[in-house]
Amino acid sequence: MQNILQNAIRFYSLKTNQKLPKYKRKIFSSLLYSKAKITGLYGSRGVGKTTILLQILKQLNYKEDEKLYISCDNPIFLNVSLFDFVDEFAKYGGEVIVIDEIHKIKDFQIQIKLIYDFLNIKVYFSGSSAVEITNADFSRRYSMYHLPILSFREFLELTFDVELPEFSLETIISDHQNITSEILHLLPNKKILKYFKTFINEGVYPYYFEDESKYIDRLNENINTILYTDLLNVTNIDSSKIVSLKKLLLSICVSDPIEISFEKLSKLVGITKPTLYKYINYLSRAELIHHIQYSAKRFANIKKSDKLYLNNTNLFHALCISGNIGNIRETYFISMLYKRHTINYASKGDFLIDDKFTFEIGGKNKSFNQIKDIPNSFVVADDIEIGFNNKIPLWLFGFLY
């Protein structure tokens, strides 16, 4: 174990020589000042979990030999007890350890509980959303944080090196014209729609800023890793069925944003309905899709089809080159709201948010005809910089976080 610790310290030393981005996402402060003994960070592949944890480790007020970063996908941890390793580090004066990719450890739930129960050391760990760290029984024991994709606000901050405010949904609804003017004033380049179109196609994941030319290639690699590695490691799905998951993603990608018949979709993908439901759950956990239910379905025995959307708009560019514009607009809207709000689709309008607000999504000429008699209803319009009354620019919903 001592040799493994020495190797881990050497790898950590090499890691600390790598340059970290100056930009810190808002969740950084919550993680840095977490008083919990064990703090977990989960999210989809590529959202920047490793970067944030390294930024935290760098800023924590401990001596350098009291800190350690390890990644569990390093072969040196194959068949190694995580508890025994952390215990060894603690014996040599370790005070805080960052455990990246913890889901690579087969029995990580047991190991992290043993560390919590018996060792006096502060732990940060990260894992994929696709694995059991999102389960209630596991997550309630520890201080857990979710890292989503970049918001449009964060994308602009990284692009222009400026600080931009975030707004609540209620504030956007009630004061969107003044907010829009404030945001445009803060940007060095006022052509926000140009950058919004870029964000729709690319830029949802932070590695866009490392190499724009390789972004879509890397996004496809992430999708394949989620399907062929993460999901295979934590589910009993047969590896030969991964092609069915990819077919399901492609079907969602090329569809109109309409109610999906699960019977038709199961036939199209070539799997049974029960298997389809199971696969939808897998892809939702992996943050590759959003599963949206009809608003009244939760309160009554209504047999109305659900809707499936890709997790974010960049996935269209990776999976099917281009998609239905209506689907893309609705996908963006969902991707910016799901973190903090309840989303259902409605019989009138496109979405009911928090059982209170109705939104109809469309282009700049979208009318109020479909929602004219509904209280608290709004048109969300693409291709406009500034809204008026109950017509709100689509891009502005990227300032919710």
Image (spheres, rainbow, N blue to C red):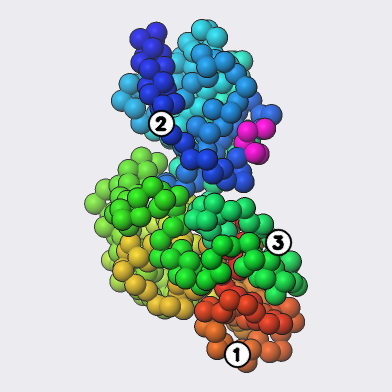
Looking at the image, can residue 154 be seen? no
Residue nearest the observer in this picture, 307 or 27 = 27
For residue 66, say whether it is visible.
yes
Query: What residue is rendered at 57% in x and 59% in y?
Result: 153
Q: Decide: marks 3, 2 in contact (CB < 8 A)? A: no
Residue with the mark numbered 3: 168
Q: Marks 1 and 2: in contact by CB < 8 Å? A: no
Local crowd at mark 2 within 10 Å, few (<14), some, or many (≥20)? Answer: few
Q: Residue furthest left?
A: 240
Instruction: Return the x and y of residue 258 as percentages of the image width and height.
Output: 46, 78
**Residue 269 sits in which quadrant?**
bottom left
Give the residue displayed 48% in from the left and 28% down from the top. Answer: 99
Q: Which residue is mark 2?
A: 18
Residue at (31%, 25%) from the top-left corner?
75
Q: Residue at x 52, y 56 (%)?
A: 160
Q: What's the mark number on residue 367?
A: 1
Please provide the residue range marked out in magenta.
29-33
